[in-house]
Amino acid sequence: MLNWSHFIYFAVVAVICWTAGAYLSFRERKTGAVYAWTILGLAVFFSFIVGLWISFERPPLRTMGETRLWYSFFLPFAGLITFVRWKYKWILCFSTLMSTVFICVNLFKPEIHSKTLMPALQSPWFAPHVIVYMFCYAMLGAAFVMAVYLLCCRKDKDVTREMLLTDNLVSVGLAFMTFGMLLGALWAKEAWGHYWAWDPKETWAAITWLCYLIYIHLRLKQDADRRVILYVLVIAFCCLQMCWWGINYLPSAQGVSVHTYNME
Amino acid sequence: MWKRPWTYLEGAVIGAGLVATGEILQLSVGEVAWNLFAYPLNVLLAAVFVSAIILAFVVRKRVYFFRWCATVQAAIPIMVWCAVLTLVMGLSGWMSMLRWWPLVLCYTFMMFVLGMTCLKRLRPFSFAFMLNHGGLFVALLAGTLGNADVQKLRMEVRVGRPEWRAIDESDNSIKELELAVELHSFTIDEYPAKLMLVDNETGKAVPAGKPEQIVIEGSVTGGMLMDWEIEADSCMEMAAQVTDGENKVKYVEWKNMGATTAAHVTAKQRETGEMKEGWVSCGSFMFPYHALKLDERYSLVMPEREPKRFASDVTVYTKAGTVKDAVIEVNKPLEIDGWKIYQLSYDETMGRWSDTSVFELVRDPWLGWVYAGIFMMLGGAICMFVSAGRKGSEQKETLKTSESC
């Protein structure tokens, strides 16, 4: 039976494949090899997730450690899609690096998981809700790094092309976030009796959602200050972190949220 | 300021004005009493609000303020205000902010701006735009105004005693319903028993922070915990604690109400070769839990088994004559006569032997409207995903042509 002690082998192989893909993306005419290496890495990593799923007899989506696993998977996946679509050479480097960070967090600070899933989480809504969110986090994480890069390294140059990429990342991320949030609302109605209860996680989801909406609306006007817009993205990403894991440590959210499963 | 065209600054000031007005209202009339908005007042208010938006839209050519309301310059500041006020609620955890006038006024104005924008974008009509914006408008309007019509009742039913009364959770009054629930049986399925070590002094599971466990399931009956090799040679799901002639505790098979789970275990210290054997049990409402002391540091325990599934086998009767048999579970509510019946709880002192099931009955007449809004937004999200990047590629084309020129 597969368990967390096997994680390191799968993770090392996957990171090597992704690094190879990222390296080749800088070489001309190696696009096929880039796809092959990245997909191979994704397949290796995904086989660990599936193995864990089978041995846990539930989707590995419950604890922070398990959600990080999906994040590590979807980052290179989002990176690959971006590479296929827009051919940015650096994107795979970035996604591999980010993914490796999350893999390392899982390796060095494991939050080992009990085998069980509480009844409210045994629902067909559960897996889509969290996977959609993980994909959204990966996209918006990429947008955040773009924003920091543009704020710090590209002060005076023409960055129209990079801003367009950021817009795309945010649009796709926000579309997924909306989807995840509304799936959550439909699920909540079935499980808890109401679609929206201003539970701390829901409150922070609303704040985060509003922040990304503000970004998108600001971008509709060409005259807005670019730095202000990018700062909105940074703030929005901070809210997203709060929504994702911050509320587990927020004093005012203790004991009242149906979303803090890892505080057993 | 206030020179046309108005910018974000004017929008921010209007938001501040709303917050100030809201605070004055809060001090003079008290918090927003959402429960007063019950039917038919909420229908009336919804009609007035929508008519006001339509009217404002019609006269927008004559009134600059209304014309401005349908612009991005109006939308962004009020979104920022709403985000900031919600942020305060998120940080402080004060749920009472939902009845705080400044927050309510800001959200109302945001919906006004949203409504105006929807009307403005009827021509040229954009399907995706209408799904996103219209969906949000419908869901917010129905969700907030319909809230006072939501009924949430709590019903406790014992096996064999049909119940038609329930407690209203908002004011703890007892209501007689048009339906009755008869409970045939209540069952809890549990996850397999687990074994773990606890520190004798602190009583906490070890290793601290990430306790190790052995799950006794199927062919798996043993494993390592710290330096102890554990093997469960028998595990009974239904057992009773008895005392033998020498006053030693042991467990025997006993399929009756109040039974507990018990396992007979042998443990071997890997380094010293020390052996221990004995019973461990998680206990029930009838029997205390039972641990096995291994050495000065550790004891072996069986934590309480975690519930996997709660289920109530019921028959529901309505006054209209409908009779429905169903199994109600967490995540699987029963829908009947406009009510949704949820599995909420049970008699926790009895654990898996509870003969009482607690249901939550929810009725929300506005749910259809909220769902309409939600599904519009889901459609809008799909459109957004599909069209993302289209604007980018158009602009890139113009970039390329301008570069080549």
Image (cartoon, rainbow, N blue to C red):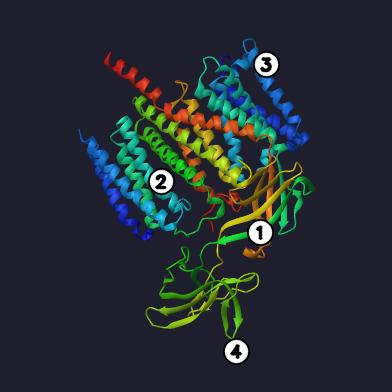
Screen quadrant of the C terminus of chain B: top left
Q: Which residue is mark 4?
A: B245
Q: Please identify the quarter of the rendering in which residue B373 is found.
A: top right
Q: CA distance from mark 3 to mark 1?
A: 58 Å
Pointer 2 local density, CA inside 10 Å: few below 14, some 14–19, many at least 20: many
Q: Which residue is mark 3?
A: B55
**Location of residue A49 in the rendering, given as x and y in whole percent from the top left corner:** 38, 51
Question: Are callouts 3 and 1 both on one chain?
Answer: yes
Question: What's under tag 2, amino acid-wise?
Answer: Tyr
Q: CA distance from mark 4 to mark 2?
A: 60 Å
Labelled pair 4, 2 in contact (Cβ < 8 Å): no
Helix, strand or loop at mark 4: loop
- Nearer the observer: mark 3 or 1; the answer is 1
**Location of residue A125 in the rendering, given as x and y in whole percent from the top left corner:** 52, 44
Pointer 4 local density, CA inside 10 Å: few below 14, some 14–19, many at least 20: few
Q: CA distance from mark 2 to mark 3?
A: 48 Å
Q: Please identify the quarter of the rendering in which residue B78 is found.
A: top right
Q: Which mark is residue B185?
A: 1
First in sequence: mark 3 vs mark 1? 3
Helix, strand or loop at mark 3: helix
- Nearer the observer: mark 1 or 4; the answer is 1
> Disc 4 sits on a residue from what chain?
B
Q: Which mark is residue A71?
A: 2
> Is B270 left, or right, of A64 in this rendering?
left
Q: Is residue B94 visible?
A: no
Closer to the camera in the image, B267 or B175: B175
> Disc 1 sits on a residue from what chain?
B
Pointer 1 local density, CA inside 10 Å: few below 14, some 14–19, many at least 20: some
